[in-house]
Image (cartoon, helix red, strand yellow):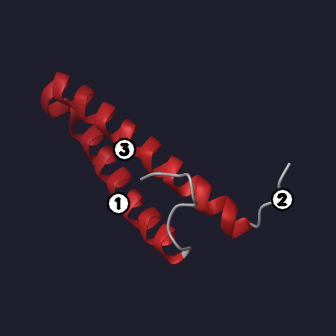
């Protein structure tokens, strides 16, 4: 079993986290659309996930992008 540095682990984890957040944000928007104005706080949560992904993407770029074999 290979031993990875923390930087290498992050290059593997960050793309997964970004994708996971995108999936949740999409689901939030879907549900918010079902309930109209009452869903505004859910839309706000989706926007927060988008902001989090922006930060995670910046971190990924600082660490050199996804590790080999990973895709965005």
Disc nearer the start of the sequence (2/3): 2
Residue 7 location, quadrant: bottom right
Tell me residue 64's x, y (percent).
Answer: 53, 73
Residue at the image point whose x is 83% and y is 54% from the top: 2
Q: Which residue is mark 2?
A: 3
Disc nearer the start of the sequence (1/2): 2
Residue at the image point whose x is 60% and y is 53% from the top: 13
Query: Mark number for residue 16?
Result: none
Q: Name the mark nearer the viewer: 1 or 2.
A: 2
Disc nearer the start of the sequence (3/1): 3
Using a 10 Å C-alpha cutoff, classify the residue at mark 1 as few (fewer than 14 neighbours), some (14 to 19) or many (20 or more).
Answer: few
Using a 10 Å C-alpha cutoff, classify the residue at mark 2 as few (fewer than 14 neighbours), some (14 to 19) or many (20 or more).
Answer: few
Task: Give the CA separation, mark 3 to mark 1.
Answer: 11 Å
Query: Mark number for residue 22?
Result: 3
SS category of the residue bearing label 2: loop
- Image: 12 above or below 31: below
Q: Name the mark nearer the viewer: 2 or 3.
A: 2
Query: Mark number for residue 51?
Result: 1
Tell me residue 67's x, y (percent).
Answer: 58, 61
- Which residue is at the front of the view, 63 or 17? 63
Left or right position of 3 against 35: right
Tell me residue 28's x, y (percent).
Answer: 31, 34
Left or right position of 45 against 9: left
Left or right position of 66 against 51: right
Tell me residue 50's x, y (percent).
Answer: 33, 54
Task: Give the CA separation, mark 1 to mark 2.
Answer: 32 Å
Residue at the image point whose x is 21% and y is 39% from the top: 40
- Which residue is at the front of the view, 60 or 25? 60
The reply to whether discs 2 and 3 touch (Cβ–Cβ < 8 Å) is no
Q: Name the mark nearer the viewer: 3 or 1.
A: 3
- Which residue is at the front of the view, 46 or 58? 58
- Image: 66 above or below 25: below
């Amino acid at each position: 079993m290979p031993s990875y540095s923390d930087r290498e682990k992050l290059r593997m984890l960050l793309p997964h986290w970004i994708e996971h957040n995108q999936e949740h944000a999409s689901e939030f928007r879907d549900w918010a659309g079902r309930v109209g104005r009452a869903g505004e706080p859910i839309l706000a949560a989706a926007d927060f996930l988008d902001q989090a992904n922006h930060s995670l993407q910046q971190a990924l770029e600082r660490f050199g992008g996804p590790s080999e074999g990973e895709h965005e």
